């Protein structure tokens, strides 16, 4: 496949290559459809999106007796219902559930219904029926079969109307459904190809640092605040830190010195081994660099940080651990598939950019006038 033809080929195969995503969407539709049969109009808006009154009139049944405030309430819900139907229907259309109608006047055997210029495939209609029947755990009658098809037609009508209104362009929720669906269809093609053992081994060797468990450090800190001199008989933070460093070197207890000369810390590091990324959350980048250069059980010189001075030491240090491939093979395989999916999406977008003219107004990146 050439680079320039990738988007067209992927789009045409979305109902095939993106079948996994399509199936997951259909499962959600089945659950929603079957659940509404159980709940009935009294618990919501019927199956799908339409209010109970519309549902009754659409089938030629008498409407509910009350037409007061509830009618206004239903009319206020209509725009929201339209958006919900549009988002779901557009996502389904993205994966090929709905197809262009045949040019012939007679309806093909594999067609369940025709809605404008689109057709609802019989196979998809039967799949929905099977899901509803399985959920209800009872056979469904002809009236229910027709109702299921009516709801699929209602959904397609909403989709077509949503496209006419331009919701796919202006509504961010609908755009999000479409882009997410297309991304999933592209990535699923890469996920479908299972990496070979040699591919997994090569990926592990090329990214050994990524799968290596980082080293860990257990550290201790003593803080000398630059704003609490009065509480220490006028002794400055620098004087107290220097005195503590000398007395620590002489073997005095760090706990006693911290109580006599130090100040409370907002978040001292816990007395456990921590990777550098987590230890940094407690001590900050400057003290982390100081700790990295210390030998185990050696106190540092007074180090400025965070409104005062610190004395820090490494109590215990654990070196990085490089695992064997057999210990992390499932993780390596999963990461390889993820990166292949990311690369497939990047290639797809690059191909789209070569086919579609894109112009950027560079003035938006210019510094604001002074």
Image (spheres, grey):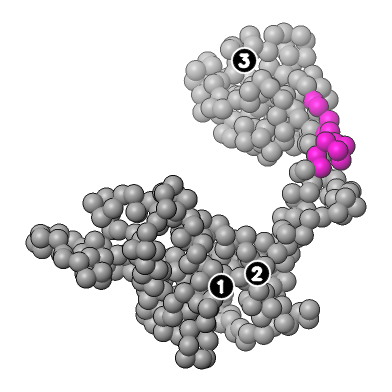
Q: Nearer the viewer, mark 3 or mark 1?
A: 1
Taking the magenta stretch, the answer to whether it contains residue 324 is: yes
Q: Quadrant of residue 338?
A: bottom right
- Looking at the rendering, the stretch of residues picked out in magenta corresponds to 317-329
Q: Residue at x 16, y 64 (%)?
A: 63
Residue 166 is inside the magenta segment: no
Q: Residue at x 56, y 20 (%)?
A: 263
| Image position of 365 (left or right of 310) | left
**246 vs 338: above or below:** above
**Chain-order first, disc 3 or disc 1:** 1
Residue 19 spot, x, y in % from top left:
62, 64
Tag 1 and tag 2, C-beta contact below 8 Å: yes
* Residue 185 position within the rendered picture, expressed as x and y whole percent measured from the top left: 63, 66
How many neighbours does mark 3 have within 10 angstroms: few (below 14), some (14-19), or many (20 or more)? some
Mark nearer the N terminus (3 vs 2): 2
**Whole-number angstrom distance, CA of label 3 to CA of label 1:** 70 Å
User: Which mark is nearer the camera, 3 or 2?
Assistant: 2
Residue 36 found in image quarter: bottom left
The vertical placement of 104 against 132, above or below, is below
Residue 183, how many percent across, how many down? Answer: 61, 65
- Circles 3, 1 touching at the beta carbon (< 8 Å): no
Provide the secondary structure element on which disc 1 rests. Answer: loop
| Residue of label 3 | 258
Mark 1 = which residue?
A: 96
User: Alpha-carbon distance for marks 3 and 2?
Assistant: 68 Å
Q: Position of residue 44 (x, y in %)?
A: 28, 54
Res 262 seen here: yes
Q: Nearer the viewer, residue 213 or 130?
A: 130
SS under mark 2: helix
Residue at the spot of label 2: 16
């Amino acid at each position: 496949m050439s680079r320039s033809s990738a988007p067209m080929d992927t789009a045409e195969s979305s109902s095939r290559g993106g079948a996994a995503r399509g199936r997951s969407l259909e499962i959600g539709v089945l659950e929603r459809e079957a659940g509404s049969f159980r709940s009935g109009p009294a618990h919501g808006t019927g199956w799908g999106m339409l209010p109970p009154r519309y549902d009754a009139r659409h089938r030629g049944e008498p409407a509910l007796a009350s037409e007061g405030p509830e009618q206004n309430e239903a009319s206020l819900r209509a725009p929201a219902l339209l958006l919900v139907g549009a988002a779901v229907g557009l996502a389904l259309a993205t994966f090929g559930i709905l197809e262009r109608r045949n040019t012939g006047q007679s309806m093909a055997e594999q067609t369940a219904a025709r809605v404008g210029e689109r057709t609802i495939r019989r196979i998809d209609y039967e799949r929905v029926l099977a899901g509803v029947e399985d959920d209800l755990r009872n056979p469904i009658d002809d009236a229910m079969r027709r109702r299921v098809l009516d709801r699929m037609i209602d959904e397609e009508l909403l989709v077509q109307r949503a496209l006419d209104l331009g919701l796919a362009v202006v509504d961010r929720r609908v755009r999000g459904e479409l882009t997410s669906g297309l991304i999933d269809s592209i990535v699923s093609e890469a996920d479908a190809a299972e990496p070979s053992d040699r591919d997994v081994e090569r990926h592990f060797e090329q990214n050994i640092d990524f799968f290596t468990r980082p080293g860990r450090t257990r550290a201790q800190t003593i803080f000398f605040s630059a704003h609490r001199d009065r509480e220490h008989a006028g002794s400055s933070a620098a004087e107290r830190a220097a005195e503590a460093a000398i007395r620590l070197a002489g073997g005095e207890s760090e706990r006693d010195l911290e109580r006599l000369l130090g100040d409370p810390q907002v978040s001292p590091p816990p007395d456990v081994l921590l990777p550098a990324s987590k230890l940094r959350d407690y001590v900050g980048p400057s003290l982390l660099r100081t700790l990295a250069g210390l030998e185990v059980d050696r106190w540092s010189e007074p180090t400025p940080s965070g409104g005062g001075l610190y004395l820090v030491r490494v109590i215990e240090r654990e070196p990085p651990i490089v695992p064997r491939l057999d210990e992390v093979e499932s993780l390596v395989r999963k990461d390889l598939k993820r990166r292949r999916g990311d690369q497939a999406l990047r290639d797809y977008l690059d191909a789209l950019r070569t086919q579609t003219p894109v112009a950027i107004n560079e003035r938006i990146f210019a510094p604001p006038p002074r």
